[in-house]
């Protein structure tokens, strides 16, 4: 089994790559007939006369182009009809529109069979929107089982397989991401090499601020849409409302926001804010670190770091980028991009068959990610994908991108050529959190989590970007969290984790 797993992964497994580009404010869909027909069944001829073709719909977000979705899906269905007797219709949405409508997709009022989940699938489970795939996975998903191995557990809740995760980098830690070319230009290599913790980075920021007054030394990693400490050195157990510290080295669920480490991090960021290492409008800044770096407006940020971060950031930002890892990478439950089969689908077997085909068949994978070879992409001299001559991300009429899945597909020219082997090595050899594979079922604490989200929206970004003084606002933040029911959520999470650990 291990040999089969490695073989598939070397050809297939690719990490999450957010490919910037243009996306229209529209939903484009295409079935085999090119008219977006409703999901259902029909007969087809040839050697399989009168057999049923099942039709399913998959909803996905993308930052890229999907004008030619109908033509691409016609090519996909030509293959899937023959191999598994299933036709698929993809409906793609621009990311902004996707997040606005995600709750609607979960409600069951939309005609959707498979739903992509960006940022986790636990909401789908708590709302009863996710189908139990446990038995279907064993019957129709053996290629996925071989590919994912123990990391399939990151799609489980209470031992039930509710989601299929992409195979990505599970072993990572919080780290500093910075402009290597600026470090080289200013001769700061020795200072950077001496950085052992976040406090040490302040001296580097001071030097950059003095030498480059038009460049912000530190910015948040995702504008004001996500917490700066989203990727911490702890295991967040799904939502940071109760965590395992030290990368999941222990088993006691604690309040992250009362820990010394959290207070220390907030204190460092506030000190940088006061000293002018970050912009005064950091709380309302909307541009991401990538965009700011491309425009020579930012030097460094905090974020998830692993074996591929330098390569990925360099290709995304168009600059030579470096990283400082603030701890040893630890494999934790990863559920940022998963696919759930909707609980009200009429075609659960067909959904599982198609997911298995998508995650294992190279021709299907290439079509869905990149479109038709020669029209939407071509292979360069190194055998990697690139846009056809005369096209780019803005003019190509189809490119959902590699973030859509971890399928058996060619690598894009911006990806690390050695990524597949490095990914397998990292996930196989990494230290692992004791809670790896744990999925928190939020059904019993839905109201509390809603109230906690409201509290965090008031305090968290300000504290974590440094704009709020933690000595003043952190106690206030924790008091509000307790009033909103944080202790109840932590107790429920601890109970579920104990059950999970006993079953291992």
Image (cartoon, grey):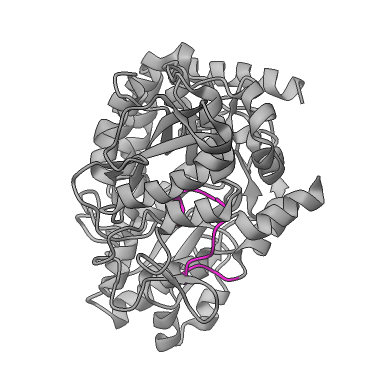
Q: What is the quadrant of residue 165 in the picture? A: top right
Q: What is the quadrant of residue 325 in the picture? A: bottom right
Position of residue 319 measured from the top left corner of the image (x, y, whole percent): 39, 77
Q: Quadrant of the N terminus?
A: top right
Task: Return the residue nearer the eye: 399 or 204.
Answer: 399
Instruction: Determine whether 97 is above or below 198 in the image.
Output: above
Position of residue 62 measured from the top left corner of the image (x, y, whole percent): 33, 49
Task: State the predominant SS element of the stretch in magenta.
Answer: loop
Say which residue appears at 66% left-offset and 22% top-offset. Answer: 135
Q: In the image, is 95 to the left or to the right of 415?
A: left
Say which residue appears at 26% left-offset and 71% top-offset. Answer: 297
Q: Residue furthest top?
A: 444
Q: Can residue 437 be seen in this view?
A: no
- The stretch of residues the image draws in magenta is 402-417
Task: Return the residue nearer the eye: 312 or 251.
Answer: 312
Q: How many marks?
A: 0
Q: In the image, is 117 to the left or to the right of 360?
A: left
Q: In the image, is 54 to the left or to the right of 428?
A: left
Instruction: Determine whether 320 is above or below 271 in the image.
Output: below
Instruction: Determine whether 204 is above or below 500 in the image.
Output: below
Task: Return the residue nearer the eye: 187 or 55.
Answer: 55
Position of residue 401 measured from the top left corner of the image (x, y, whole percent): 40, 56
Say which residue appears at 39% left-offset and 58% top-offset. Answer: 371
Position of residue 238 measured from the top left corner of the image (x, y, whole percent): 51, 32
Task: Return the residue nearer the eye: 61 or 18.
Answer: 61
Q: In which quarter of the image is the C terminus?
A: top right
**Magenta region includes residue 413:** yes
């Amino acid at each position: 089994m291990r040999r089969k797993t490695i073989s598939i992964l070397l050809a297939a497994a690719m990490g999450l790559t957010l490919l910037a580009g243009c996306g229209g404010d529209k939903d484009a869909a295409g079935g085999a007939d090119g008219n977006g027909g409703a999901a259902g069944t029909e007969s087809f001829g040839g050697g399989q006369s009168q057999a049923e073709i099942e039709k399913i719909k998959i909803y996905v977000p993308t930052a890229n182009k999907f004008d030619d979705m109908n033509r691409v899906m016609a090519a996909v269905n030509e293959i899937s009809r023959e191999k598994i007797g299933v036709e698929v219709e993809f409906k793609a949405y621009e990311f902004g529109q996707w997040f606005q409508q995600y709750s609607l997709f979960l409600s069951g009022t939309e005609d959707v069979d498979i739903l992509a989940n960006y940022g986790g699938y636990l909401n789908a489970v708590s709302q009863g929107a996710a189908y139990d795939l446990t038995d279907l996975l064993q019957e129709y998903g053996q290629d996925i089982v071989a590919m994912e191995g123990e990391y399939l557990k990151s799609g489980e809740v209470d031992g039930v397989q509710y989601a299929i995760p992409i195979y990505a980098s599970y072993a990572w830690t919080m780290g500093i991401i910075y402009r290597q070319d600026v470090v080289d230009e200013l001769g700061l290599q020795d200072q950077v090499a001496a950085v052992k913790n976040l406090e040490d980075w302040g001296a580097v920021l001071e030097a950059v601020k003095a030498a480059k007054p038009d460049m912000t030394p530190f910015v948040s990693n995702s504008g004001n849409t996500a917490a700066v400490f989203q990727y911490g050195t702890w295991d967040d157990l799904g939502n940071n409302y109760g965590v395992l510290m030290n990368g999941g080295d222990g088993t006691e669920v604690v309040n992250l926001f009362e820990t010394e480490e959290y207070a220390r991090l907030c204190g460092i960021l506030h000190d940088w804010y006061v000293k002018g290492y970050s912009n005064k409008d950091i709380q309302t800044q909307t541009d991401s670190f990538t965009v700011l770096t491309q425009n020579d407006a930012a030097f460094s940020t905090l974020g998830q770091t692993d074996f591929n971060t330098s390569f990925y950031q360099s290709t995304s930002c168009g600059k030579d980028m470096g990283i400082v890892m603030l701890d040893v990478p630890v494999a934790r439950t990863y559920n940022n991009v998963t696919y759930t089969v909707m609980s009200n689908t009429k075609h659960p077997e067909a959904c599982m068959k198609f997911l298995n085909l998508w995650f294992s068949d190279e021709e299907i994978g290439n079509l869905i990610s990149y479109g038709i070879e020669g029209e939407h992409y071509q292979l360069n001299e190194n055998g990697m994908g690139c846009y056809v001559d005369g096209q780019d991300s803005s003019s190509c009429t189809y490119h959902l991108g590699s973030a859509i899945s971890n399928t058996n597909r060619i690598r894009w020219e911006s990806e690390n050529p050695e990524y597949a082997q490095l990914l397998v090595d990292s996930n196989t050899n990494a230290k692992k959190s004791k809670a790896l594979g744990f999925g928190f079922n939020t059904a019993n604490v839905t109201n509390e989590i809603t109230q906690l989200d409201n509290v965090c929206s008031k305090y968290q970004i300000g504290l974590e970007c440094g704009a709020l003084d933690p000595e003043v606002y952190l106690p206030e933040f924790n008091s509000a969290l307790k009033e909103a029911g944080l202790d109840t959520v932590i107790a429920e999470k601890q109970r579920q984790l104990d059950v999970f650990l006993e079953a291992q």
